[in-house]
Image (cartoon, rainbow, N blue to C red):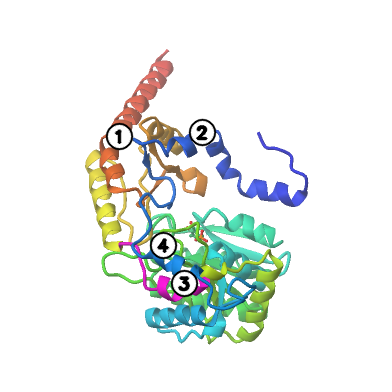
Amino acid sequence: MAIELPSTRMNTLAAAWSAFLPLTETDWREARKAPDACDFMTGDPQEGPLAGYVETLQQNLIPERHDWFGYHQGNPEAAEAAAKSLREWCGVPFEPQDIALTNGGFGALAASIRAATDPGDEIIFNLPPWFAYEAMVRDAGAVPVTVHIDRETFDLDLAAIADAITPRTRAVIVNTPHNPTGKIYPPETLERLALLLDEASTRYGRAIYIISDEPYNRIVFDGKRSYTPAEFYPRTFLCYSYGKVLLAPGERIGYAALPPTMPERKQMRMALTLAQASSGYLIPNTVMMYALPELERMSLDVEHLQQKRDLLVDELRAIGYSVHRPEATFYLTPESPIDDDWSFARMLAEEHVYTMPGSMFSLPGYFRLSLTANDQMIERSIPRFKAAFERAHQEQSATQLQAAAGTDD
Ligand code: PLP
């Protein structure tokens, strides 16, 4: 039952997070930590930290100046390391002064949304979304407008985005590679999106921005690469988090980067700083900033993640599940063998396999698995996925037989 909160703002935020409510009624959060559990629920690490990670943080904890732990809104070496890595990756000549270091992707998104919008502005985002978009948009006083991705190809539905644009549209949030489908939006799609946003900005005499959410842009498979909208559209905020590639989402660092082609980038730099300061200091801890040039060179083992993807896709298909092979990210999104994905996720939980039902993120009929589960969990999970699949089919057949018998009476 929904609890009445002390302010309208908090009631609005509670509604924005309400898809999580059914989860609070389960004991999964604790149960998934049991020794024989198979935890596919979130992108949390299921193994120790990356080699060298702890040592890097330890080294940067030792003060080199009197103000080592003082207020530092940024850090030139960290900003240059991030800009250099972006330049090498996508060829856009990002400059260090246009990198606003944030406490992760959350901070980058919140600051970008606030920097770009006025209360009442509309922000379009795509379904299935990442969980926090609606709450962040509403908390900024902006209005969420949603469109569904193409259900067949998982690509952006550009016609639906075009239809959703109004004179109040200020931004479109694009998440590439996409959580939960693992889709990398192709350059042609991003190019066409850029054209349509240019045209709409001119038509309404008001710039529309892309807020590009890209925490998985280094976690791509099969030798592919991800593309940032900043390669195609100058008015892009590139929001990044190191939490995924370093498998350390609790150690907060990321950035919002503005491409040098953004016409009002000087004003936007200032706007980002104001948004960071006014929204509760959305800036990383100093140690994380000092460590960033070294952290930039570290990565989880993407090849191993790809092997886990292939093993799970092949095994699940052999059981009878319908599942596509994602191009990137941590996630697999198989179809639930029965329409009610919550019921199916509960059946899996009874087998001690913990997943996220698609209804929690506007993808009913599916469920999501995180490939951050370790090898032992994956191995243990296969017979359990089989048992739940068979049970779902048996129960569905029994219900259908009962319904048919009822009709005959
Ligand atoms: N965007 C997407 C699509 C995500 O999946 C996540 C984390 O799950 C984030 C942003 C936020 O990342 P972080 O917690 O590292 O800030």
Mark-to-mark CA distance, 4 and 3: 10 Å
Residue at left offset 51%, top offset 86%: 95
Task: Compare residues 407 and 305 and report the one nearer the observer.
Answer: 305
Mark-to-mark CA distance, 4 and 1: 35 Å
Q: Quadrant of residue 297?
A: bottom left
Residue at left offset 37%, top offset 27%: 396
Left/right of residue 81 with respect to residue 8 in the rendered view: left
User: Is residue 309 at least partly visible in the picture?
Assistant: yes
Q: For mark 4, does the 10 Å Cα neighbourhood hold few (<14), some (14 to 19), or many (20 or more) residues? A: few
Mark-to-mark CA distance, 1 and 2: 19 Å
The local secondary structure at tag 1 comes to: helix
Magenta-colored span: 289-301
Q: In terms of sequence position, does the residue under pointer 4 or pointer 2 come before the other?
A: 2
- Depth check, mark 3 against mark 1: the one in front is 3
Q: For mark 1, does the 10 Å Cα neighbourhood hold few (<14), some (14 to 19), or many (20 or more) residues? A: some
Tell me the kind of residue under disc 2.
Answer: Thr
Q: In terms of sequence position, does the residue under pointer 3 or pointer 1 come before the other?
A: 3
Tell me the kind of residue under disc 3.
Answer: Ala
Above or below residue 388? Residue 157 is: below
Above or below residue 382? Residue 208 is: below
State the mark number for residue 291.
Answer: 3
State the mark number for residue 26.
Answer: 2
Q: Is mark 3 within 8 Å of ligand 1?
A: no
Tell me the kind of residue under disc 1.
Answer: Arg
The local secondary structure at tag 2 comes to: loop
Check if mark 3's residue and mark 1's residue have beta carbons within 8 Å: no
Residue at left offset 61%, top offset 77%: 66
